[in-house]
Image (cartoon, grey):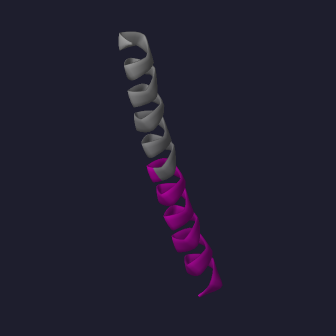
Amino acid sequence: WEIERRTSSFANSFSNVALETAQNWLEAFAVYHNSRQT
């Protein structure tokens, strides 16, 4: 049970990190795109 619990919590934290990274990347891309248009 312990291994399963650790694996699921690791998967949850990993998906959270991936989600935050994707959001940061999208924000950075949007800023870059906007700065090029002006």
- Using the image as rendered, state which of residue 2 and residue 15 is in the foreground: 2
Q: Which residue is located at x 51 percent, y 63 percent?
A: 28
Q: Taking 3 as reference, is 12 above or below it?
A: below
Q: Nearer the viewer, residue 3 or 37?
A: 3
Q: Position of residue 16 (x, y in %)?
A: 43, 44
On-image quarter of the N terminus: top left
Please state if 34 lies on the left or on the right of 20 as rendered: right
The C terminus, quarter of image: bottom right
Query: Could you say which quadrant of the image residue 5 lies in?
Result: top left
Lateral position of residue 22 relative to residue 17, left or right: right
Query: In the figure, 25 relative to 9: above or below?
Result: below
- Residue 26: x %, y % from top left: 56, 63
Farthest-out residue, bottom: 38
Q: Which residues are magenta?
A: 20-38
User: Which residue is rendered at x = 49% and y = 59% of the image?
Assistant: 23
Residue 18 picture location, percent across and down: 51, 43
Q: For residue 36: magenta? A: yes
